[in-house]
Image (spheres, rainbow, N blue to C red):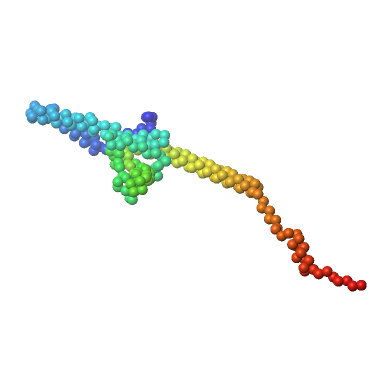
Amino acid sequence: MKKNNKFKSGLNKSIFAALAVYHIMIIIPFIINRFLWRDVTTWYAFMLLAVDAVFLLPLIFNTYYSLEDTYLFVFQWPFARLKIYYNDIFIIDNVFPEDAEKKYKKKYGFTNKIIVIGFYAEVPDRKAKKLKKVKKYVAITPADYNAFMIRIGGKFSSAKKVASKLEETLRLNEEEHNKKKAKVAKERKQKADENKPIDVVISSKKKTDFNSDTADTEKPENTTE
């Protein structure tokens, strides 16, 4: 993973204040345990310390966003390992749209200065028993907000250009294929027409019959000398 592609989540001052209070709560039992029930305060302190080491600190300080070649990777332990492909992105903004569905709105970060990314995702359709594309929105909070916006904007634009070029190439290839297909069909039809046997209709009327018919209508001239 390239370091310049990895952006840590920003932190509000309130987060730092909450962490300070939490760690004071861990330290206090070790200081005053001689004045209280030793077993209770010790277990209390170790429980808070375990939560701090296993869950709280990794959640806060190991939330990051990585701009890979074809997708944005969002990591927030233990909740999210999300890949958002640039081709599926349809909006990058700093607010959620008013019509955004609440169930598709999620935030991965710890500041109020957010970057909202709208993208298409495939979800199962129980009624149709197949996958369907729906709009989803996520909010992320990179510490280096401006640098991230520049980088993801570049990735997004490049992906769209590549997608447009690929779409145009596929369209031209399809047109060429259809032309060749039509040409082959035309050649086959011409060849079939050339090889088609010619139907010759021969009259069943006999020549003698023809002569007899004409004989009845034409009478010989009587010549008298």
Q: Can residue 72 be seen at all in this image of the molecule?
A: yes
Residue 161, percent from left and from top? 47, 40
Q: Please tell me in which quadrant of the rendered image residue 146 appears.
A: top left
Above or below — where is 112 with respect to 23?
below
Q: Is residue 110 above or below residue 49?
A: below
Coordinates of residue 11 in the picture (x, y in percent): 28, 36
- Residue 117 x, y percent position in the rendering: 36, 42
- Say which residue appears at 45% left-offset and 41% top-offset: 160
The quarter in which the C terminus is drawn is bottom right
Q: Which of the pair 131/209 is nearer the observer?
A: 209
Q: Where is residue 10 in the image (x, y as percent from the top left)?
A: 30, 36
Task: In this rendered view, identify the residue nearer to me: 152 or 129.
Answer: 129
Please give left or right for residue 224 compared with residue 65 in the image. right
Q: Is 112 placed above or below 43 here? A: below
Location of the N terminus by quadrant is top left
View extreme (bottom): residue = 224
Q: Is residue 29 visible?
A: no
Number of numbered callouts drawn: 0
Residue at the image position 33 percent from the left and 46 percent from the top:
126
Pick the residue in front: 170 or 75: 170
Q: For residue 177, which quarter of the picture?
A: top right
Q: Residue at x 30, y 37 (%)?
A: 80
